[in-house]
Amino acid sequence: MHTLLDHFAPAALPEEAERFRAQVRGFLAEHMPALPADRRARSWLGFDAAFSRALAAQGWVGVTLPRAHGGAQMDAFSRFVLVEELLTAGAPVSAHWIADRQSGPLIHKFGTEAQQAFYLPRICRGEAFFCIGMSEPNAGSDLASVGTRAVRAAGGGWSLSGRKIWTTNAHHCHYMIALVRTSGTPQDRHQGLSQFIVDLSLPGVTVRPITDLAGDAHFSEVFFDEVPLADDALIGQEGSGWAQVTAELAFERSGPERIYSSIVLLDRWIDWLRARGDTRHAAAVGRFATHLAALRGLSLSVTARLAAGESPVVEAALVKELGTTFEQEIPAAIEAALGEEPDAPVDAELLRTCAYVSQICPTYSLRGGTREILRGVIARGLGLR
């Protein structure tokens, strides 16, 4: 019987990628800010432009982009190692994250030569931070029903109106790549969608940060009121937005950030158990270790497909669905373990970290596509719907 797991050929990191790991660890030893675990647990939501620019000075932002555009021209395996080391250390990488992971590769793949020449070097220098304009109020993860619209302007170019929501770091970013409708109606679904690069400093753009339960303001709602866009803001061909987004989501859903979001908390708990000589939870730790090993293997398999120039959309959806479930199980299990001894003293840093991850982890199965949407993608990939 054919299963989706047949699409996951075992893959191993090349020797040069493993050698690269030592360089990344050396960089982190020198440049990693001294942050407590509850701050490091924010990692790819932790905005630190200075850290991102220090990383860019090493050539490690836009790491897979061509040297002609300022990139390091490394393969997807090297980026996997870089991301893995940054996330497990809890480095504050949010400033450059979206541009490095998907906006830069998207522009490289679908953008014009002029767009590549303008944006890619700025991304690689840590001078251009990007956010993603996909989700909208009343649309959720159903991207095909977006209502934000760009219409041809009388004097040339486009006029953009509508709004986006849950836009990570929009209040810090220079640009947004927005999926909008350029023809038809939401009932036309995938037809008539296009992507634009939107300069967030343009007149008519309003960005309102949204404070979350943890007290942070990573997300924003972005309003467009007849924002003037030049013709060269369009990425690729008009109407090709859905195909572009589909390829883009394979980058977003498959990487280590979909399995390591709670890893700083897990490491802190293990350190605390070790310091106390507490072996009662060894089985739980072992279960997390084996789950992590399996998920990492799946993610590496998808990375190999990406390195081969493929677009493993369904496989990436599976990694994201399984990975975020794992990430959400970690704080729940640690809370339960701590609750077994309600009167016992607990390390304050561990408690703060557990509280933060418990508050933020419901978003893990929302960002990058909800659990229901991903399961639909997987079901279609298996021919079940």
Image (tube, rainbow, N blue to C red):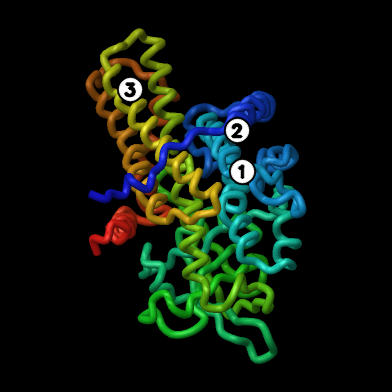
Residue 365, x across and y down, in percent: 35, 49
Residue 102, x across and y down, in percent: 56, 54
Residue 33 visible somewhere in the drawing: no
Q: Residue at x 41, y 83 (%)?
A: 185
Label 3 packing within 10 angstroms: few (<14), some (14-19), many (20+): some
Label 2 packing within 10 angstroms: few (<14), some (14-19), many (20+): some
State yes or no: discs 3 and 2 in contact (Cβ < 8 Å). no
Q: Residue at x 28, y 57 (%)?
A: 382
Residue identified by numbered label 1: 75
Foreground tag (1 vs 3): 1
Position of residue 117 relative to residue 100, above or below, is: below
Left or right: 12, with 342 as reference point = right
- Specify the label residue 285 is tagged with: 3
Give the structural element (helix, strand or loop) at label 2: helix
Q: Which residue is most to the front?
A: 1
Residue identified by numbered label 2: 17
Q: Quadrant of the C terminus?
A: bottom left
Q: Which residue is most to the bottom?
A: 154
Residue 173, x across and y down, in percent: 62, 56
State yes or no: discs 1 and 2 in contact (Cβ < 8 Å). yes
